[in-house]
Image: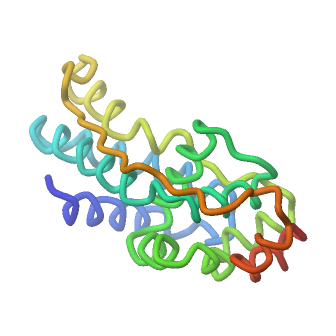
């Protein structure tokens, strides 16, 4: 399975959670769970391919400006927190992912983020990181084979001090308006 196939899987999982309100904080978890179930029904080679495709997609969102947005939204953001945040972003689907990676301030357009801002919830989905692992375990009864995934994160440019509220407001004005950065 390639990246296009992976995104098709996410869209199928999102369609399978259609009864869930887009602003529901549990939607990301439901999408990750459904994607895991759907992937577990596929041949092992597809599960392995989807696992690599997921990490390739995550690498595409490994950007300093997006980390700054996650830092603002979640009131801080560790390395692990940034992984979980990007896992959440993947569950929002390809279109949302592409818009947000191109311009992190467009996160303010997402109903789930707006609801989270209003309720004070963190944005994260750790379980999305385990879609391939859990699908493989379910399908085969075994953990992923060693060397299944190669994670190729680029060098990251942070660009600014995330605690600099003036700079955050300049770079992410709509998110600062939502979160009062």
Q: Position of residue 19 (x, y in %)?
A: 55, 69
Q: Position of residue 25 (x, y in %)?
A: 69, 58
What's the colour scheme?
rainbow
Question: For the point 59% across and 57% down, which residue is it?
Answer: 158
Question: For the point 46% across and 54% down, which residue is it?
Answer: 62
Q: Nearer the viewer, residue 16 or 133?
A: 133
Q: Quadrant of the C terminus?
A: bottom right
Q: Nearer the viewer, residue 78 or 84?
A: 78
Query: Is 86 positioned to the left or the right of 4 in the image?
Result: right
In the figure, residue 45 lies in which quadrant? top left
Work out whether 66 lies above or below 171.
Answer: above
Q: Position of residue 140 (x, y in %)?
A: 20, 23
Query: Is 29 positioned to the left or the right of 16 in the image?
Result: right
Work out whether 20 lies above or below 176.
Answer: above
Q: Position of residue 172 (x, y in %)?
A: 71, 76
Query: Is 106 positioned to the left or the right of 87 in the image?
Result: right
In the figure, residue 131 lies in which quadrant? top left
Q: Nearer the viewer, residue 11 or 61?
A: 61
Question: For the point 35% across and 67% down, which residue is it?
Answer: 11
Question: For the point 57% across and 44% down, which residue is it?
Answer: 84
Query: Is 107 positioned to the left or the right of 140 in the image?
Result: right
Work out whether 21 lies above or below 35.
Answer: below
């Amino acid at each position: 399975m390639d990246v296009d196939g992976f995104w098709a899987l996410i869209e199928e999982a999102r369609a399978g959670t259609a009864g869930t309100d887009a602003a529901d904080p549990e939607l990301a978890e439901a999408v990750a769970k459904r994607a895991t179930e759907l992937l577990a029904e596929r041949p092992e080679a597809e599960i392995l391919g989807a696992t690599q495709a997921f990490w390739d997609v995550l690498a595409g969102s490994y950007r300093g400006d997006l980390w700054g947005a996650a830092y603002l939204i979640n009131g801080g953001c560790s390395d692990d927190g940034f992984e979980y945040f990007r896992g959440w972003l993947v569950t929002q689907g390809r279109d949302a992912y592409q818009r947000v990676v191109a311009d992190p301030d467009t996160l303010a357009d997402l109903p789930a983020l707006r609801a989270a801002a209003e309720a004070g919830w963190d944005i994260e989905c750790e379980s999305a990181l385990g879609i391939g692992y859990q699908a493989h375990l379910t399908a085969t009864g075994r953990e992923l084979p060693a060397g299944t995934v190669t994670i190729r994160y680029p060098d990251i440019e942070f660009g600014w001090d995330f605690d600099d509220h003036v700079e955050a407001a300049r770079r992410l004005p709509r998110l600062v308006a939502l979160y009062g950065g």
